[in-house]
Image (spheres, rainbow, N blue to C red):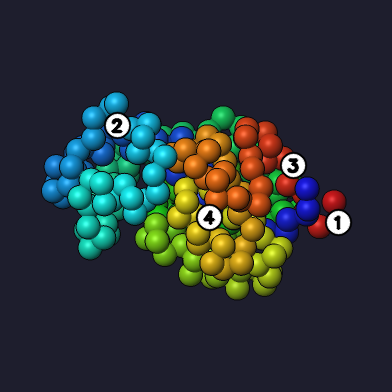
Amino acid sequence: MAAVALAIFDFDGTLADSFGFFVRVFNELASRHGFRSVEPHEVPALRRLGAREIMQRLGLPARKLPAVTKDFIGLMRKDRGSVRLFDGIHDALLALQGRGVALGVVSSNARDNVMHVLGEAARAVRYFECGVSIFGKRARLRKVLRKSGMAAGEALYIGDQATDLEAARAEGVPFGAVAWGYGDFQALRAMEPEREFHRVADLLGITAPGR
């Protein structure tokens, strides 16, 4: 595996095991904002779709997405004690930092939610770009690259959604797909990410230049 100087992570579904919370509040958000609610049996099929396809199927127009995201963030802020990092993420982040890999987070969630859930592991992360639209991550990846002084080819963006991969690809950043997130891994794999992480422990295979 080629060395990575900068590992940038998505948050929800990649670092944070927040899918259960998302499912719990989804229909509340649907009622507030006038899009279709989801029955439990529909969830597996929806996980195989991209964000745009899900929005179309549920009747959620793009113009409403900022308000929906804001309310999701607010609901998590009230109940973020129920959201935990995936097992092993805390130690993996500290280990990567210790090996000389610079770490960043690019997320549509709010920075205070991200910091709270990361807990002590937040000290391993050097760059935060939070509160961004799920369709606006390319510009935030560019900001992290600029702050770090690193080239796109030296970085790896790690996430669980097609929108994450699309943002990375548009910016020329290699993408690593995780198998434990919101999205269906086989659907993400079909988009040919540069790397695959089947277990959290696989993240430890990232090595910094010169290591």
- Tag of residue 210: 1
The Cα atoms of the two marked residues, 2 and 4, are separated by: 24 Å
Q: Nearer the viewer, residue 94 or 14?
A: 14
Q: Which of pointers 3 and 2 indicates the residue nearer the eye? A: 2
Look at label 4 and name its amino acid.
Leu
Which quadrant of the view contains residue 196?
Answer: top right
- For the point 67% across and 41% down, which residue is it? 203
* Mark positioned earlier in the residue sequence (1 or 4): 4
The residue carrying mark 2 is: 42
Which mark sits nearer the N-terminus, 2 or 4? 2
Lateral position of residue 53 relative to residue 150, left or right: left
Question: Can you identify the residue that label 3 sits on?
Answer: 205
State the CA–CA distance, disc 1 to disc 4: 27 Å
Observer-side mark, 1 or 3, equals 3
- On screen, residue 105 versus residue 156, left or right, reads left
Give the total number of marks visible in the rendering.
4
Q: Residue at x 28, y 27 (%)?
A: 40
Amino acid at circle 2: Glu
Nearer the observer, disc 2 or disc 1? 2
Q: CA distance from mark 3 to mark 2?
A: 35 Å
Marks 3 and 1: in contact by CB < 8 Å? no
**What is the secondary structure assignment of the residue under circle 3?**
helix
Q: Is residue 177 visible?
A: yes
Q: Earlier in the sequence, mark 2 or mark 1?
A: 2
Residue at position x 17%, y 47% in the image: 35
Q: Position of residue 74 (x, y in %)?
A: 28, 48
Determine which of the numbered discs, if any, sits on residue 165 in the image: 4
Tell me how far mark 1 sits from mark 3, CA to CA: 14 Å
First reached walking from the N terminus: tag 1 or tag 3:
3
Name the spot of residue 199 as percent of width and height, x first: 63, 32
